[in-house]
Amino acid sequence: MNRRYFFFAILAIIILAMIYVFVLNDEQTEAGFSVESSELIMAEDDVQSIAGVIRNNTDQAVDAMELEIKLFDDEGNAIGTLFTKTGEILADSTTAFYLKLVDISPVSEFEVSIVNSKEKSD
């Protein structure tokens, strides 16, 4: 009887973890927009940068998108938050972003969030 409860507890944990990974952790913070990819880059001059791609999944072009990037050290401590803007993103297309991390402690992890977007005015 105890094995059955243990089995169901493990199964429940696995299902919850899968829901988090595939549904809740999609880095989409504003309806219709998503972070397709992002990576931490170490340049030859030992300056880190963050580069990525944002997707506009809507049928409306936007003039700009504001991104919030939270930075963490190797122990998981927050060491800063930066903001950057993209240029125009056409409907159902992507744009790249690049942010050089100057005068910041070494970054081990980061999170990119889309803060807001400004619809294109005709």
Image (cartoon, rainbow, N blue to C red):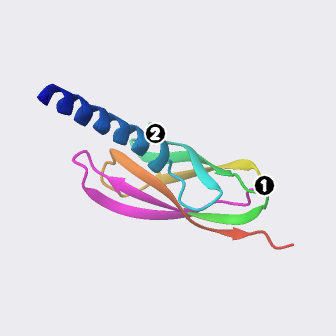
User: Looking at the figure, which quarter contains the N terminus?
Assistant: top left
Q: Let me know if residue 14 is in the magenta part.
A: no
Residue 59 rendering spot, x and y as whole percentages = 79, 57
Residue identifier under label 2: 43
Tell me if residue 22 comes above or below residue 33 in the rendering.
above
User: Between 90 and 2, which is closer to the camera in this rendering?
Assistant: 2
Tell me if residue 95 comes above or below residue 61 in the rendering.
above
Tell me where residue 9 sits by quadrant: top left
Residue 100 disc label: none
Q: Which residues fall within the magenta stretch?
A: 67-91
Q: Secondary structure at mark 1?
A: loop
For this view, does 98 lie left or right of residue 19?
Answer: right
Instruction: Give me the residue at 29% from left, 38% from top.
Output: 13
Residue 25 rendering spot, x and y as whole percentages = 45, 48
Q: Residues within 10 Å of mark 2 (few under 14, many from 20)?
A: few
For this view, does 3 lie left or right of residue 66?
Answer: left
Mark 1 to mark 2 CA distance (whole Å): 33 Å
Residue identifier under label 1: 91
Instruction: Give me the residue at 70% from left, 48% from top.
Output: 94
Q: Amino acid at mark 2?
A: Ala
Instruction: Give me the residue at 25% from left, 50% from top.
Output: 76
* Furthest-left residue in this view: 2
User: Looking at the figure, which quarter contains the C terminus?
Assistant: bottom right
Residue 121 rendering spot, x and y as whole percentages = 81, 73
How many marks do you count on the picture? 2
- Mark toward the viewer: 1 or 2: 1
Q: Amino acid at mark 1?
A: Ala
Nearest to N terminus: mark 1 or mark 2 = 2
Tell me if residue 118 comes above or below residue 49 in the rendering.
below
